[in-house]
Image (cartoon, rainbow, N blue to C red):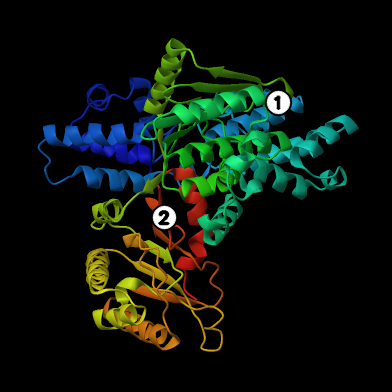
Amino acid sequence: MTFAEKLNEYMKVFFCSPKQLVALSGVSAATICRYRAGSREPSADSALFDNIVKGLSLAAEKAERTDISADQIRSELLSVLRDDSGLYDIDSLRYTLDTLITKLHLNSGDLAGSLGMDQSKFFRIRSGQSLPPDIRAFCSGIGRYIFSKLGDDASQDILSDILGCTTAELMDQKTVCEKIVGLLTGDAYSPHAYAQSYLQELDRFNIDDQPSALDRLSYHLADKDAEEAFTRALNSVHPDSRAIICTDLYSGSTEDDSMLNSLAYAMAALIRKGLRIDFVLNADNPMDEILPGLKTLMPLFLSGRISAYYLKGRRDGIYRNRLISLENAAFCVEAVTGHYDTAVRRVITDRQEVDSYRRRAQQILGFASPLIEILEDSESRLAVLASCSKKAGKRVCVLSTPPFFTMNNALLSRILMRNGVGEDEIARVNKYLHDERKRTLQILKHSEFVINYPAVTAESYNENPVFLSVSGLFYDREILCTYDEYAEHIRLMKRFEKEHKNFRCIADKNSPFRNIQIFMHLGMWVMISKNKTPATHLYIEHSKLRQAFENMLSPYGESE
């Protein structure tokens, strides 16, 4: 069943006309018409999807269908969304397709005809109004058409630059098609590779090893007047106030990296002063642009003092801008991509202008959606996990220790006492064990739970010892397990597996992480928990970012 068919079925069951659904959902009549016709679908994480669910739920209430809940409507609509609706970036496809047509001087009418598609339908795809039914077949057809039109040396040089290959490689149709499919679908940048790199950096990161950001601030600000004004504003700003930063986040060229570094060190200075930062990424970029930037800013996110947001659906590859808004000053940078030598930098200290820029930053923040949420304490983490413990869906966890909740109180107390932990702390950690086990048992009533844990031999244990993970309590102290304690924990885990049919544990002899735990509710969210220095929990619902981590980590949820 398709999304359109399910939507029409609900409307029929609830005696809901298109006009009524428009009124109940707030979605335009034209959009609902396209959804019902199957020419377009909302993305799973969009406000449009949420509004359709809301409208149908209200229609169910009016029809007195108390047997159909809002959660059921949401779940069933999610189950019939096209698999490619979230995997492919419609804006990226539109931009790349338009680039190919423009730079290679392709005739869009001929191209549409070669795909067996009328020009109006092709125009909707090119303009980003819809996705083709089979994206990979569509992109492959474009590859074959482009190969057939490669004639003179000029067109070959242009295409080789776009695809990043030699002109000799363009002589092979299969190679050209594969590269164009990869370019159009996003496979060419392999988001999971960036996710892997990001996680490895996170695993290694130790905040105590980081150099003083202020020591190198002047070099990265690259403007002496701006540096002095920034320092003056920082010295007089109240440490309890919040900074708002609205910025592009690109990485790749030397100029991009320089802009990114200047941002990182300005943010570091704000954090050292004690300020909290609302960070708004004003472009919904592909993963090859987001993750390298996040990797650079990772030490700052781990401070727990940054709330990260993004503006959905906006991409701008030409005009770059940045606004840092403080209570007593504002700093603006405007530039054109590739021409940073002509960038305009403004330092605003006039009270009226500062207030104006502050309102502008707050307005932008009001339009933003969460990108990465930092869970700042154990209560916040528990609230997030408890809120979804009754929701169905496969869980996959990649751990740096055997799962904490499979341990019993006797073993836990023995490990804690041997590590010199006091009685009050032992009681606190034992309660944490009780809460974690209770929540896990709730999930196992309805869903599969797969754990990937490190398999360590007695011979290699001294080199790779296992520490108890209590990062959920924001407990930074290392609690070392002996090999015998580790082995006993493994036995308890295996017993737990036999007692619960939905629970499965997979040993990994080459576990890539030593200091982070990754929890995934597939299709819903990813939580990355750092065990120590510092104990931090990053919560991600952003669909592209979540999918990048899920795709990279999906093998960990499969059998050995």
Crowd tier of the residue under label 1, counting other residues whose Cα lies within 10 Å: few below 14, some 14–19, many 20 or above: some
* Marks 1 and 2, the one that precedes in the sequence: 1
Tell me the residue that label 2 is attached to.
Answer: 536
Q: Is residue 92 above or below residue 470?
A: above
Tell me the residue that label 1 is attached to.
Answer: 340
In the rendered image, residue 58, in percent from the top left (x then y), is placed at: 18, 33
Marks 1 and 2 in Cβ contact (< 8 Å):
no
Residue in the foreground of this view, choosing between 322 and 366? 322
Q: Residue 283 carries which label?
A: none
In the rendered image, residue 140, in percent from the top left (x then y), is placed at: 66, 43
Residue at left 27%, top 76%?
500
- Residue type at numbered disc 2: Thr
SS assignment at label 1: helix
Residue in the foreground of this view, choosing between 12 and 376? 376
Q: In this view, does 229 lie to the left or right of 541?
A: right
Crowd tier of the residue under label 2, counting other residues whose Cα lies within 10 Å: few below 14, some 14–19, many 20 or above: many
Spatial CA span between label 1 and label 2: 35 Å
